[in-house]
Amino acid sequence: MHLPEPRGPLSETLCRDLATRTALSATTIERADRVAAGGACALTDEDLQIGLAVLYELHYRGFDGVADDWEWDPALLRVRAGLERRHLAGLRHLVGPIAVTDEPIDRQLAALIAADDGPSLSAFMAKHGTLDQWREYLTLRSVYHLKEADPHTFAIPRLSGRAKAAMVEIQADEYGGGAPARMHSELFAGLMRDLGLDPAYGALWDEAPAVAFASVNTMSLFGLHRRWRGAALGHLAAVEMTSSEPSRRYSAGLRRLGFDERVTVFYDEHVEADAVHEQIASVDMCGSLVADEPELASDVLFGAACSLAMDGVAATHLLGAWETGRSALRGERGLAA
Ligand SMILES: [Fe+2]
Ligand SMILES: [Fe+2]
């Protein structure tokens, strides 16, 4: 995987430093401080989001030509912490205050989901999505699905008992239950290939808009900080609880365009698996965590709310662009433009 194209002053010097130096330059540190102190729209800030994604990627598969030693570089972690503070402020602003009640956490999660009034992208894709719009949607989602399950998996060693066993049960399915070809990331890569997209890990980063990275950066932040373990579990629960029905609609959208079950397997798999995962995630995983550590209830709900809200931001971005006949991808790279 190659370093992405820069999207502003910070990502420009950050990527140059990673490729050519052994320590961050003063310019990068100064630019990162400026981005960290920036204003409201953190979640759509291209320079911030690609910069944060590059820093997190050092914990995943890294980049060609970038030394592994960068992963725990203290100056780099300090820069990342500044960007994370602004990202978190953006998330808090997006989801607003969250009320915790005395109800079991699975019911509170269900209520949060029921109250979500974000636009339904799956309904649009089922009925109207064109092949070009499908390619744009998959390009955006590839930033997550080609590493599907990995961000949440970072949280596993931070858990114990039933919550841990439940999360491992879910993640084992995400990783194909021992069959590499059944890994959800592999099924997604197959779908990309079938629709004529490059399925290589990270190959389409340069085309994906900030919101794609903001969504994955949120998961990485929750997974990589023990302090945010409750949010990581709440986020995963919301993903699982809102997957089965929409997956059915996405599958229907592809079949409407003439694709058969060989192509729709990624979604068909999620219709089945996530109907089961929903219960394990909300009752066993989040329920056990909150039973052991009741003070984490608000973090669980915050993580779930972030998942729902980021899906809403992505849907609004895609539908808004398509409504006006524009591509939702970056610049002139847009496929449907
Ligand atoms: Fe999955
Ligand atoms: Fe799942």
Image (cartoon, grey):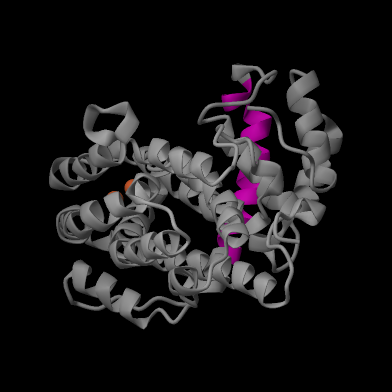
Image quarter of residue 101: bottom left
The answer to whether residue 293 is seen in the rendering is no
Q: Residue placed at 63% from the left, 23% from the top? A: 70
Q: Quadrant of the C terminus?
A: bottom right
Q: Residue placed at 26% from the left, 73% from the top? A: 110
Residue 12: x and y, percent?
A: 82, 38
Magenta highlight range = 70-90
Residue 260: x and y, percent?
A: 37, 51
Dominant secondary structure of the magenta stretch? helix
Up-down: is 297 above or below 28? below
Residue 172: x and y, percent?
A: 24, 37
Up-down: is 242 above or below 108? above
Up-down: is 311 above or below 56? below
Q: Residue placed at 28% from the left, 49% from the top? A: 269
Q: Quadrant of the N terminus?
A: top right
Q: Is residue 277 left or right of residue 39?
A: left
Q: Is residue 156 left or right of residue 199?
A: left
Q: Name the foreground residue: 32 vs 205.
A: 205
Residue 48: x and y, percent?
A: 71, 51
Q: Is residue 131 left or right of residue 230?
A: right
Residue 122 included in the magenta stretch of the image: no
Q: Is residue 267 left or right of residue 332?
A: left
